[in-house]
Amino acid sequence: MIRVCPKCDVGLLIAHFKEIEVDYCERCRGLWLDAGELEELMRRTGAVADDPFLRSLQQEGDVPSGRKHLCPRCDKSLREIRIAAAGKPELVLDRCAGHGLWFDANELPELLAMFPPETGTVKTIAFLNEIFGMKPITQKEK
């Protein structure tokens, strides 16, 4: 089964880089990470993947997404989860319980910039910028 972009409804590309696999939409630059892949991405890029901040990504997502975004794995409607960190704007992500997270363009680096600096997610942000040319975001920015 070809995974389809929840936003554009086109087939997702599977990108392999440094033994990491992500599903990527060439049109909107969104990313799909299956359950556990964010933690694996962080580990493989040298970041600490057991920070308590990750627990906020495991919430169920009470609010149906206001958009018709469907999970690339099961075709059920994605649900919104709201992520907040002190001094940073709230981030709204789309999640399918048990299957993974959808990140619109640049939402993944924005999320990683919310982690405490000691987690080392700046390495993961640099990795994403290297393979996808994503907007550079540092942990010091909003």
Image (cartoon, grey):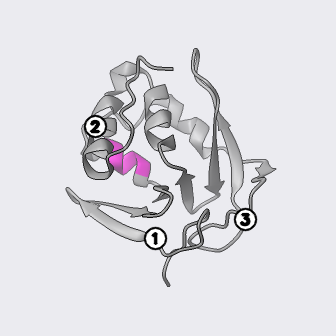
Residue at image coords 55%, 54%: 101
Residue at image coords 51%, 37%: 54
Residue at image coords 75%, 53%: 65
Q: Nearer the viewer, mark 3 or mark 2?
A: 2
Give the overall secondary structure of the magenta segment.
helix
Q: What kind of residue is marked 3?
A: Ser
Q: Which residue is mark 1?
A: 12
Confirm whether the magenta stretch covers residue 41. Answer: yes
Mark 2 or mark 1: which comes first in sequence? 1
Q: Which element type, helix, strand or loop, lies under badge 2?
A: helix
Gap in Å between the C-alphas at discs 3 and 1? Answer: 17 Å
Q: Position of residue 126 (x, y in %)?
A: 28, 37
- Asked if the residues shown at circle 3 and circle 2 are in contact, with their CB atoms under 8 angstroms apart, the answer is no
- Where 137 falls versus 9 (above or below)? above
Gap in Å between the C-alphas at discs 2 and 1? Answer: 22 Å
- Where 36 falls versus 10 (above or below)? above
Write down the region rendered in magenta. 38-42
Image quadrant where residue 125 sits? top left
Q: Nearer the viewer, mark 3 or mark 1?
A: 1
The numbered disc on residue 77 is 3
Q: What kind of residue is marked 2?
A: Ala
The numbered disc on residue 126 is 2
Q: What kind of residue is marked 1?
A: Leu
How many neighbours does mark 1 have within 10 angstroms: few (below 14), some (14-19), or many (20 or more)? many
Mark 3 or mark 2: which comes first in sequence? 3
Q: Which element type, helix, strand or loop, lies under badge 1?
A: loop
Image quadrant where residue 121 sits? top left
Confirm whether the magenta stretch covers residue 23. Answer: no
